[in-house]
Image: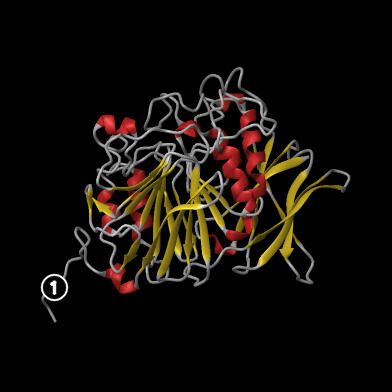
Amino acid sequence: MAGNVKLSLLARGWLQMTVTWTSGYDISEAYPFVEWGKVGAVAAPTRTPAGTLTFSRGSMCGEPARTVGWREPGFIHTAFMRDLWPNKEYYYKIGHELPDGSVVWGKAYSFRAPPSPGQNSLQRIIVFGDMGKAERDGSNEFANYQPGSLNTTDRLIEDLDNYDIVFHIGDMPYANGYISQWDQFTAQVAPISAKKPYMIASGNHERDWPNTGGFFDVEDSGGECGVPAETMYYYPAENRANFWYKVDYGMFRFCVADSEHDWREGTEQYKFIEQCLSTVDRKHQPWLIFAAHRVLGYSSNSWYAAQGSFEEPEGRESLQKLWQKYRVDIAFFGHVHNYERTCPLYQSQCVTGERSRYSGTMNGTIFVVAGGGGSHLSTYTTAIPNWSIFRDQDFGFVKLTAFNHSSLLFEYKKSSDGHVYDSFTVDRDYRDVLRCVHDSCFPTTLAT
């Protein structure tokens, strides 16, 4: 009847949770809704109606999505559960009311409502990119193109009780124009996305197609040009065709950029990025995170090294002054299928010799490539740049744990065993965030 359930947050989503699912029912055939309530409450559950979208072959931009890869996607329903109590447990199940008044029910799930912005509680975040999907029956798909995706999925399912929200920063199913592959991927991650907010970013394999308004005129999406990703997942962008948005989650603010659209100074996206970074109240939300799919920061991937820039062309030239001015703590990227962490960095220079225990003022941003979610692995340059602290050519993901407003733990875990292979801590106070650093000093006056 219905499946592939996905939770997500709104921009200031602590009062709300979004649930999206797919079914074979158009609105004229059955009325979609979600029934939900607080676990343990005596009050009757709430029923909230859902909106319904779909997309057609004509909305695809090229082959194979318009031809041999096309398959009817069904109907995508989205409902909003509102006025949630922070950190309370809720149950929900999706339903479709038929014309005769009977109801076809989906499975029952539960979730924990997000913390309010600035709330001082334990908050745990998962970040990775480039997962893909794979066959559990052992068959070989696309020359085993995404060999690590099941390991990553299984580790996250096993550890469901020990994290709160997931950020999958681009390159999700690698459907590449074969629409049925989206169903396979969303079914694979459904045990995660039905219980935890599953936030996504746009990658080249979701969006890129020539002459469709993107920044890269390549055919990586197989003609999808972003339509399945933008329809099957909910994310709090003002314009769903522009995949940039912000999320406040307790003590964190996430500024999620769209590396498949122009990010350079003077663009609409650049204005959004500065607005997102500049409007966070760091005394209540001290942990400021930037994320995008392509490497707009630093990577010693062999292709980037051959270009001489260790980044996407023009990747950080406009953005690094924003990261520095607004004291971004960590910038995450995917696209390169491995793991790499830099020192705190500005203008290609390490601003400290410390490698694992950071305290006081952070004079730069730590850049992390977390593209080892499951797709075939990428190689590094043989010469290791002095800013590269840890590299791992393996499948894995990152976990951030904020214990309070002053203490953050970063862990990189391998998907093969779930063990920690790289980590660092940050300990600081609000005054350390305010303190003047290079290219981040506000004007002062001699007046008293």
Q: Residue pushed farthest left?
A: 446
Q: How many badges with numbers are in the image?
A: 1
Q: Is 163 placed left or right of 406 in the picture?
A: right
Which element type, helix, strand or loop, lies under badge 1? loop
Name the residue rendered at 52%, 71% in the picture. Answer: 121
Residue 420, how many percent across, how many down? 49, 53
Residue 411, how many percent across, how many down? 46, 55
Quarter of the rendering containing residue 310: top left
Res. 78 visible in picture: no
Instruction: Indicate whether 62 appears above or below 105.
Output: above
Q: Which residue type does callout 1 highlight?
A: Thr
Quarter of the rendering containing residue 364: bottom left
- Residue named by callout 1: 445
Q: Residues within 10 Å of mark 1 (few under 14, many from 20)?
A: few
Instruction: Indicate whether 233 appears above or below 365.
Output: above
Instruction: Indicate whether 335 appears above or below 78.
Output: above
Which image quarter holds the C terminus?
Answer: bottom left
Residue 247, how many percent across, how many down? 48, 56
Q: Is 173 placed left or right of 427 in the picture?
A: right
Q: Residue pushed farthest bottom?
A: 448
Residue 173, how many percent across, how many down? 56, 34
Between residue 265 and residue 256, name the one nearer to us: 256
Name the residue rendered at 73%, 67% in the picture. Answer: 39
Which image quarter holds the N terminus?
Answer: top right
Q: Is 76 placed left or right of 416 in the picture?
A: right
